[in-house]
Structures are given as structure tokens and as C-alpha cells.
């Protein structure tokens, strides 16, 4: 934490900053998050540093949560690599039961 004339700056490995700009507060979070929802209700949010290692960890978690959610008894209904590429490109996986999984970048 550093005290400055214009406010306080907080820095962590998540690259969070707070400054005052013309009397207004500003929060900047540079991160990648995996957000899990069910029936429109937030179930969990996991956030990683937005760098190559953090992106890899977020993608790994996203894939793990999709695999855990899908029915192991229906292998023909499970996502394949092409599906995962599409989910990651669009930043969302969802099914007909109301389960949703998002991967987002905050800047």
C-alpha cells in the first residue's frame, strides 16, 4: 500500500488499484475469472492473475467444472475438444438445466 496525494494505491499479485480521479473513485482489477451459476444464482467465482499462468489455471478449472457437470453415464453427450474451443472462444458453457459457466477477463 502506498499513500499518494491523490489517494491510496493498493497493489497485489492480482493487480488491483484504487485511485481518486477528480474526486471519483476508480477500481481496476486485472484478472481472469471463472464464474459458475445455476438457475440464475451465483454459485462461485474464482479469480486468477491475468497472465499466461493465470489464464492456464482458469482454463484448466473451466474444463474441470464442465467435465464434472456433464453426465459420465452419457459419453456421447460429453464435450469434446472442439466443443471446449468454442466454449472458451465464447467465454460460456451452458446447458438446458440452467447451469452456466463463464470465463471472463476484467480490465
Image (tube, rainbow, N blue to C red):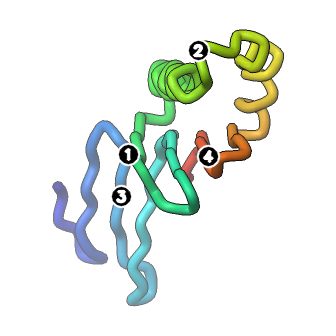
What's the CA distance linking mark 1 and mark 4?
Answer: 27 Å
**Of label 3 and label 2, which has the lower sequence position?**
3
Residue occupied by mark 2: 72
What's the CA distance linking mark 3 and mark 1?
Answer: 6 Å
**Foreground of the two, 63 or 107:** 63
Q: Relative to residue 30, is residue 77 depicted above or below? A: above
Going 57% across and 62% down the picture, which residue do you hit? 40
Which label is found at residue 17?
A: 3
Q: Are marks 4 and 3 in contact (CB under 8 Å)?
A: no
What's the CA distance linking mark 2 and mark 4?
Answer: 18 Å
Quadrant position of residue 102: top right
Q: Position of residue 105 (x, y in %)?
A: 58, 45
Going 27% across and 61% down the picture, which residue do you hit? 9
Q: Position of residue 52 (x, y in %)?
A: 53, 21
Quarter of the figure with the N terminus: bottom left
Residue occupied by mark 4: 100
Q: Position of residue 88 (x, y in %)?
A: 71, 30
Q: Position of residue 39 (x, y in %)?
A: 57, 58
**Of label 1 and label 4, which has the lower sequence position?**
1
* Front of the two marks 2 and 4: 2
* Front of the two marks 2 and 1: 2
Instruction: Sort mark 3 into few (<14), some (14-19) or many (20+) by Cα contacts within 10 Å.
Output: some
Q: Relative to residue 12, is residue 42 depicted above or below? A: below
Q: Are marks 3 and 1 in contact (CB under 8 Å)?
A: yes
**Foreground of the two, 81 or 75:** 75
Query: Is disc 2 placed on a helix, strand or loop?
Result: loop
What's the CA distance linking mark 4 and mark 3?
Answer: 29 Å
**Foreground of the two, 10 or 71:** 71
Residue occupied by mark 1: 15
**Foreground of the two, 41 or 105:** 41
What's the CA distance linking mark 3 and mark 2?
Answer: 43 Å
Amino acid at each position: 500500500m502506498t499513500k499518494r496525494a491523490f489517494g491510496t494505491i493498493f497493489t497485489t499479485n492480482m493487480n488491483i488499484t484504487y485511485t481518486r480521479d477528480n474526486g471519483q473513485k476508480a477500481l481496476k482489477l486485472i484478472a481472469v475469472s471463472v464464474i459458475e451459476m445455476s438457475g440464475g444464482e451465483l454459485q462461485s467465482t474464482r479469480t486468477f492473475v491475468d497472465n499466461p499462468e493465470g489464464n492456464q489455471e482458469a482454463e484448466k478449472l473451466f474444463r474441470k467444472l464442465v467435465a464434472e457437470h456433464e453426465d459420465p453415464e452419457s459419453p456421447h453427450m460429453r464435450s469434446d475438444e472442439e466443443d471446449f474451443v468454442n466454449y472458451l472462444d465464447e467465454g460460456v458453457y451452458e446447458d438446458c438445466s440452467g447451469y452456466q459457466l463463464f470465463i471472463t477477463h476484467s480490465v
